[in-house]
Image (cartoon, grey):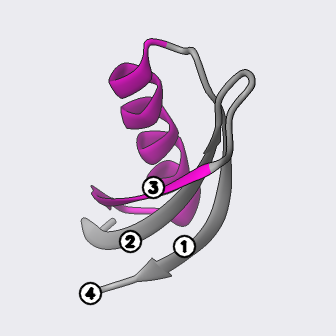
Amino acid sequence: MTDRLWKVTVSCLFPMGKPIEKVFEVHHATEEGARDAALGQEATAHGGSSIPTIVKIEEIR
């Protein structure tokens, strides 16, 4: 499969806070893989202290 570039928007809900949206650009062959990669980056960035949800995903190329 070909490696594709995806733009994944993730909404992060923090305890006692407002949701914050972040955009990740990830390389992966499939949409599911791109979703998992973006959620993994979010977990790494916040140490698992947020509840992430995929808002939107689009293929860039």
Three-letter residue code for mark 3: Ala
Tell me the mark number nearer the camera, choosing from 4 and 2. Answer: 2
How far apart are labels 4 and 2 at the CA level? 10 Å
Q: Residue 49: name its quadrant.
A: top right
Q: Residue 46: name its quadrant.
A: top left
Which element carries disc 2, helix, strand or loop?
Answer: strand
Q: Which residues are magenta?
A: 20-47
Which element carries disc 3, helix, strand or loop?
Answer: helix
User: Which residue is identified by label 2?
Assistant: 7
User: Which residue is identified by label 1?
Assistant: 57
Magenta segment: does it hold 36?
yes
Residue at x-position 28% and y-position 72% = 4
Local crowd size for mark 2, using a 10 Å CA cut-off: few (<14), some (14–19), many (≥20)? some
Which element carries disc 4, helix, strand or loop?
Answer: loop
Quarter holding the C terminus is: bottom left
Q: Are marks 2 and 3 in contact (CB under 8 Å)?
A: no
Q: Which mark is residue 13?
A: none
Which element carries disc 1, helix, strand or loop?
Answer: strand
Q: Is residue 41 left or right of residue 16?
A: left
Local crowd size for mark 3, using a 10 Å CA cut-off: few (<14), some (14–19), many (≥20)? many
Three-letter residue code for mark 4: Arg
Quarter holding the N terminus is: bottom left
How far apart are labels 1 and 3 at the CA level? 8 Å
Local crowd size for mark 1, using a 10 Å CA cut-off: few (<14), some (14–19), many (≥20)? some
User: Which residue is identified by label 3?
Assistant: 34
Three-letter residue code for mark 1: Ile
Q: Are marks 1 and 3 in contact (CB under 8 Å)?
A: yes
Tell me the mark number nearer the camera, choosing from 2 and 3. Answer: 2
User: Which residue is identified by label 4?
Assistant: 61
